Image (cartoon, coloured by chain):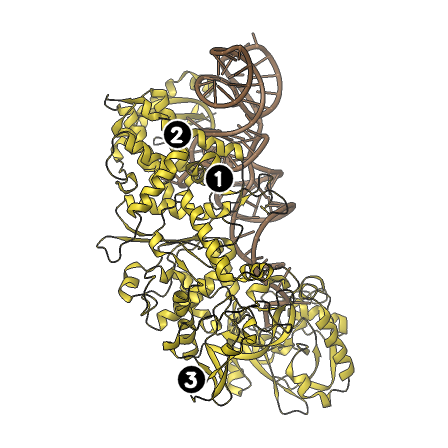
Amino acid sequence: MKHNFKKIESKWQRKWEDEKIFRAVDGLDKPKFYGLVEFPYPSGAGMHVGHIKAYSSIEVVSRKRRMEGYNVLFPIGFDAFGLPTENYAIKTATHPRIITDENIEKFSNQLKRVGFSFDWDRVIDTTDEKYYKWTQWIFLKMFEKGLVYRDKAWVNYCPSCKVVLSNEDSQGGKCDICHSDVVQKSKDVWYLRITQYADKLLEGLDTVSYPENIRQQQVNWIGRSTGAFVDFSVTGVEDKLEIYTTRPDTLFGVTFMVIAPEHPLIDKHADRIQNMDAVEAYRAECNKKTEFERTQLVKDKTGVKLEGLEGINPVNGKKIPIFIADYVMMGYGTGAIMAVPAHDQRDYDFAKVFGLDIIEVIKGGDIEKEAYTGDGEMVNSDFLNGYTNKKDSIARMIQELEKKGIGKGGVQYKMKDWAFNRQRYWGEPIPIVHCPVCGDVAVPYEELPLRLPKVENFAPGSEGESPLAKIDSFVNCKCPKCGGDAKRETDTMPQWAGSSWYFLRYIDPNNDEVFADREKLNYWMPVDWYNGGMEHVTRHMIYSRFWHRFLYDLGVVNTPEPYAKRSAQGLILGPDGDKMSKSKGNVIDPLDIVDEYGADTLRTYVLFMGDYGVATPWNDSSAKGCKRFLERVAALTDKLTDAPSTPEFQSKLHKTIKKVSADIEDMKFNTAIASLMILVNDVYAAGSINKEDLTVLIKLLCPFAPHLCEEIWETIGGEGFLSLASWPVFDESKTVDATKEIGVQVNGKLKGTIVIPTDAEKEQVLEIARGDEKVQKAIGEKKIVKEIYVPNKIVNFVVK
RNA sequence: GCGGGUAUGGUGAAAUAGGCAGACACAAGAGACUUAAAAUCUCUCGGGAGCAAUCCCGUGCCGGUUCAAGUCCGGCUACCCGCACCA
């Protein structure tokens, strides 16, 4: 048979869709498998070849699971709120709804042309009001539980997108969307108290199967540290200056304090600060610096001493100067530090610039040269002198601080609360009403969804307020509590909201009563295997784990963690080895490949091209090689024989079943495909194959190249869909050979190979090895001093 | 600076738990078929020496453990990813 991919691919895609053979059935009395891939943002550009690779892994596993008898849920949907659509809407004066619908239509057709076995009856769209009703519902539940708060704050603001960004969206001081420099702006911000879940998110990592690098990235992102909060008195003022430190045991080495330039103490006691001019000048200078300069370039210490205020070290009563400096951040800890120059390099550098005292309290380094951050004996530290163990000295100091009421042990996180509002149109409206009497009031649950109103002009206002603020009919409303005149919140939720719980909605996508039926959740959750990109490890994954954990604490889902297992694909690079980008002109369009080589070739190649987790350049000739392989498979129907299979071929076949089965589970798709290529080469060498053996072969290949395998199955008279046939089981006894070829080494160097009966006795093997001509020659006149035999692997003679 | 990872032919890459390095492909070269080309099929294909049998070298670098190291240990180097004046 010829491989007429154009004809057979559309034929089988239609059949699969008509008969809905990939539909997941709720509550079936079968083991379940929930395979998940990150749902796409339906951009106008259409599908990227990276999508194909990202989905192909779980696609292959899901197809294998179905054949193994599992009830499989492998869904797809669209994460469709977001800025690119909104910007395109502004540019073309088209409503984002229309653009989104068009793009979803386009994406769906493209996905279908690759033959992915999604359950198309469960498609979700985060911009559908039936969906975002429940996004708003979860938000209100969080509001109800005190996990939502509003605060005026200095925030990351992108002047180009005119939008407030979360910490995560402005990494490196650049806007994640447009890459402009982010500035600090004082704004009204809605926060989700994700920090309250920091420990739960950390602990949850021990209960799931994530690759080490992903686990580590999440641990770093949460950034838990333990230490102590200590109150320092300030001369002449009532307030205490609270600092956070991880090394409270170095308190006797404190020689000055540093507070962030934005620290409220400064304005509060401005009248006592004699050099307010210099302070203001320094603050202005800091404000001018971009985040990039502040964190990347300027490691030189700068600062200004606050004249008129002095700190008092609570453990020894010493007066110490207070500085402002931009190396202390308002956003971490308390925005104030005690400086121990002898044992912290930054404090050391600062002390050198300003000529401050450096007092050693831990022995072991040379504080003339640099700060010593290692362990050692405590000195100059009163009751801590003589301690050599960091843990003990810290514990003792915390005990002392708590006894005297001047400090306490505490925990800090690098992770900050999640800035949750955006001044944009194309997002979920935040369902809150501002009442002059009652304050912030939740929109009643029965009024959800709070729909996005129709707008003529989607552009944000000049001050960066939401386009919704211009719609009086939306803004003006009655307070749900007191019935008085009130105004609606006009900001919308960030892009990440909809994707924070979408995997739950797939389970029950059309439910109008609850976000998903509890029994169905119990059946399907958790997600058994989730594949996606590394770029979503610290945002989407942490956010969605947080939301899911919240829902668990609320008692509405059955598992604390949403994803039992996570994997990540490596990028497909352009043929030139660079990251694909339009500007470089090295983008591969997957649909071009489908047209030219077929979907089966595309699917097979993206998994064959290399290690699944590693970035690999696209190589068109290699892709063609996969096409060649599939053509050779198609032609096997011309080699059919009625003759029974040979024991040799049975052995090869069963070894291949074993290898392919194991490799798919280990995501070693490249070697799984390679072993199928070897098997096909073996058939060509033998000249013929019988129907039974060919059936096994196409079953193994079916998850990778399903259209072709279905067609072959039909051609050789198979009944029903091969995609629903049973996965081959190997016979272990047939994977063991009667004889084995092993190497024989002399002094660790390979000198010959011998054939031995499998599991032969050591003496028998050594006998054969000694008798080998080449081995004898290598030994020559020398004496054998040691004989090593590793069963079925190798013989080594040590000679002198 | 901290954390994670990677390094193997001309290329993408294989190598179970320390046991025949380079499977499977791609590219290249030669040949067959063809009026010709494409496609297909056959052969060669890490480096060096040799007519050859064969021998020597070879998994980023230096050292170690071992009968045996791509694999384990110690010390480097380069690159990639993430975080970063985090107190």
Q: Residue pushed farthest left? A: A29
Q: In this structure image, what is the colour of chain B?
A: brown
Q: Chain of mark 1?
A: A
Who is closer to the viewer here, A409 or A105?
A: A105
Disc 1 residue type (three-letter) = Gly
Is residue A760 among what the camera can see? Answer: no
Q: Which residue is mark 1?
A: A610
The residue at 38%/41% (across/down) is: A663
| Above or below for A103 versus A393 | above
Residue A480 — which label?
3
Q: For the residue carrying disc 1, how many other residues have a C-alpha within 10 Å: few (<14), some (14-19), or many (20+)? A: some
How far is mark 3 from mark 2, CA to CA? 66 Å
Rendering coords of residue A222 (x, y %): 50, 66
* Image-based side of A353 in relation to A780, left or right: right
Q: Within the image, what quadrant is residue A306 found in?
A: bottom right
Rendering coords of residue A770 (x, y %): 38, 20
Who is closer to the viewer here, A520 or B24?
A: A520
Q: Disc 2 on helix, strand or loop?
A: loop
On the rendered image, what quadrant is the N terminus of chain A found in?
Answer: top left
Q: Disc 1 on helix, strand or loop?
A: loop
